[in-house]
Amino acid sequence: MPKPGFLLPLRVEQISEKDWLLTAPLQYYSALLDRILTVPAGFVTDFASVPRLPFMYWFTGGLAQAPAALHDWIYRTPEVDITRSQGDAVFEEAISARGYWEARSWFMWLGVRLGGWSSYKPRSR
């Protein structure tokens, strides 16, 4: 089985204080899902929405932009047919694939598991 990882680099342009526009597709191979996920050019992300609590932001803020953009797309695009728990697991997988410390990827995963429910758009059946 191939290793998980990004197949195309993250290319973005800042369009507001917090929003970034993908100027090219972002591709990621997920071993967990055994498929390639493609975030299209034109998708808008705010990357990781980390609370500005001192320790939390120091530990996780401003990191893992490509995994965060991928996670935003999974959460906001019901037609990709990925459950919230799968999306969160792919987020952790993508952070780990970028070589971040295991405790940091787990902590970021925990943040989306605890706080991401309000942003997830489930697929309507």
Image (cartoon, helix red, strand yellow):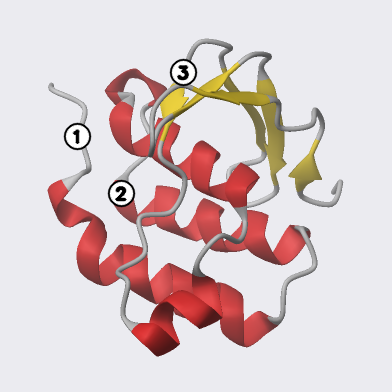
Image spot of residue 83 (x, y percent): 32, 43
Q: Who's the residue at 76% across and 50% down the image?
A: 4
* Residue matched to label 2: 84
* Label located before the other in sequence (3 or 1): 3
* Label located before the other in sequence (3 or 2): 3
* Residue matched to label 1: 122
* Label located before the other in sequence (2 or 1): 2
Q: Who's the residue at 21% across and 27% down the image?
A: 123
Nearer mark to the viewer, of 3 and 1: 3
Q: Secondary structure at mark 2?
A: helix
Image spot of residue 57 (x, y percent): 44, 75
Which mark is drawn over residue 43? 3
- Left or right, residue 122 beside residue 47: left
Separation (CA) of disc 3 from disc 2: 19 Å
- Left or right, residue 9 beside residue 103: right
* Whether residue 106 can be seen here: no
Residues at circles 3 and 2 in contact by the CB criterion of under 8 Å: no
